[in-house]
Structure formats: C-alpha cells, structure tokens
Image: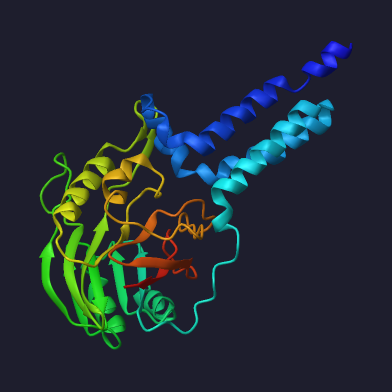
Amino acid sequence: MAAIRRTRGLVTAAVLAVVAALLLFASAVPRLPGNVMSLVETFLPWLGLAVPAGLVVAAVRRSVVAAAASLAVAAVWLAVFRTALPPAPEPGARDAGDMTVVQHNVSDENTSPSRVARILLGADPDVVALEELTESTLPAYRIALGRTHPHHATVGTVGLWSTYPLTDVARVDIRPRAVGDGWDRGLRAVVNGPRGKVATYVAHLPSVRLRASEGYATAWRDESARRLGVALSSERAAAVLVLGDLNGTAADRGLGPVMDQVRGSRGEFAFSWPADVPLARIDHVLARGGEVTTTWTLPATGSDHLPVAARVRF
C-alpha cells in the first residue's frame, strides 16, 4: 500500500514535466506534423493552467508528487512570464523621445468607422495603422482621422495616418505566391517625426486555420512573414516601425523572419484577439533602432480584434 501511495500522481507529474519543458524550451522543439508547435507557441502563457489542474489532481489523489510538480511548473511559469505580471503603466505624460502609436484590424464587417476612430484617438496617438479597410469605409476613416492626423497613405486594405508628414510611400509585396493579384496588404512610408525619419511598415499577414487535413494551417502566413522579413532585412533606415495584424504571437516560430529584424514589448500580455475573450496578442507594434517601452489594449470597437497601443522611444 505504501508503494502505491508513493506512485500516486506520477502520470500527472510526467505531464507537468512536459509542460515545464515546453515553457522553457518550446523554440528548441523541431517542427512537428500539423504545425503543432506554432499552435503551442501561440497560446504558450495558457500552459500555466496546468498548475491549478495539477493541484486539483494532487488534492483528489492525495499525491505529494503531483503537488510538488505543480509548484515546480508554477515556478517555471513565473520565471518565464514574470515581466508580464505587473500592471502595465498607465499611459500618462510622454517623454520627449516618445511616439505613441495605435495598431488595429478594424474588421471589414465593422459598420461604425466614427466609433472606431473615437476609441483609437482616445490614446492620443501620433501614428495610427489600420487593416481590413474597405472601399466603402475608407472615406469615413479619412474624415474621422484626418482632422487630427492629416497625413495619410493607403495601399489596398491597409492604411497609415500620422500627425507628422509622410514621404516615400510604397507598396510592400508580401503576397503569397498562391494568392491572386489584387491582394495588397503591405505598406511602407517614412514618418518624418521630431526625432528624425522612421521607416514605418503596415502589414496584414494571412489568417491561419485549424484544418483536419493539415492541422494548424500557417503556410500562407509563414510565406508572407518571410517576404516581410526580407523587406525588413533590406531596410537601411536607422529607425524602423512595424505595425500590423501578423496573425501570430511573437513566440510563434512562423513569425521568426520578422521577429529576427524587429522587437516589441514583452512586458505586458496585451492580448488582442479575439476581442470578446482575448487569448493572444496577434496585433503588434515592433521596432528597430528604438524601444517599444509599453504596450496596452484599447476598448472594443466592434471588430474581432482589440486595438493595440504602444509607446516607442527613439
């Protein structure tokens, strides 16, 4: 009987050991069929739910082993995500070198551009990037945002509004080869800010899907990310911003070509999708030659994404 008690919870402990290993070394796991690791990396913080589950099993089974394993995973989770636990600083008076930016997938089904603009402008942004603009809603966004952000540029379904002059506006080709012509979701423009020129990219990468035949289908998204990564690697500007719905989290290996070039703030979770129950931050403000110091989300706008605001120091 004593031997049985000592072995209680070993299976639970083994599962928790796998969770701890994933938290620490997910990026080292090779690609698996069905892109399983991209899916795991997308929701990596939520692996922490294994801790209360393990403690429940430990209590029911009266297992010291399961309890100890649960506490060990809790320690690992805290070590990995400790910087995201303190509340995000309240957006207050900005430093002289700060630029406030807002990034939002407005949804092509959103019927209230004026409400969207009101919420976005509440963050007092210098720059606003939008995705899923449509021919019918674009004029309304131009009016609503143009009063405070008179400099703007659009390419296809993405747009950029700025309080500072924009120059060198150009299309960025991030279209996967299998997608037909007319798919324009990449934009580059130079924001001529108070600290100099900032090469600013607005990008909307393809969506990902869970499919029975493919698993976590990310091929188009990954190809588009590679093309964006190539554009960023060729960028010679000293200061670079990337704003967009990248349809993946910073930890998702499919976004590696982009994340190798620019970085965001990892100090806050700032989950942006889905808007009703945010589970992941797939909308990003990323920088090179500057630091994204704070990231937070804004109230819902009627889109399936929450707007993401950030402070960037150049």
Instruction: Tell which residue pokes out farthest to the right in this image.
Output: 1
The quarter of the rendered structure image containing the N terminus is top right
Residue 226 appears in which quarter of the rendering?
Answer: top left
Q: Residue at x 35, y 74 (%)?
A: 113
Residue 189 appears in which quarter of the rendering?
Answer: bottom left
104 versus 144 height, above or below: above
Residue 69 appears in which quarter of the rendering?
Answer: top right
Total labels: the figure holds 0
Residue 97 lies left or right of residue 300; in this view the side is left
Q: Whole-percent x and y of residue 107?
A: 35, 61
The one of 42 and 106 positioned closer to us in this rendering: 42
Whether residue 197 can be seen here: yes
Q: Whole-percent x and y of residue 101?
A: 35, 73
216 versus 283 height, above or below: above
34 versus 2 height, above or below: below
Residue 127 lies left or right of residue 123; in this view the side is left
Q: Whole-percent x and y of residue 314?
A: 31, 73
The one of 107 and 250 positioned closer to us in this rendering: 250
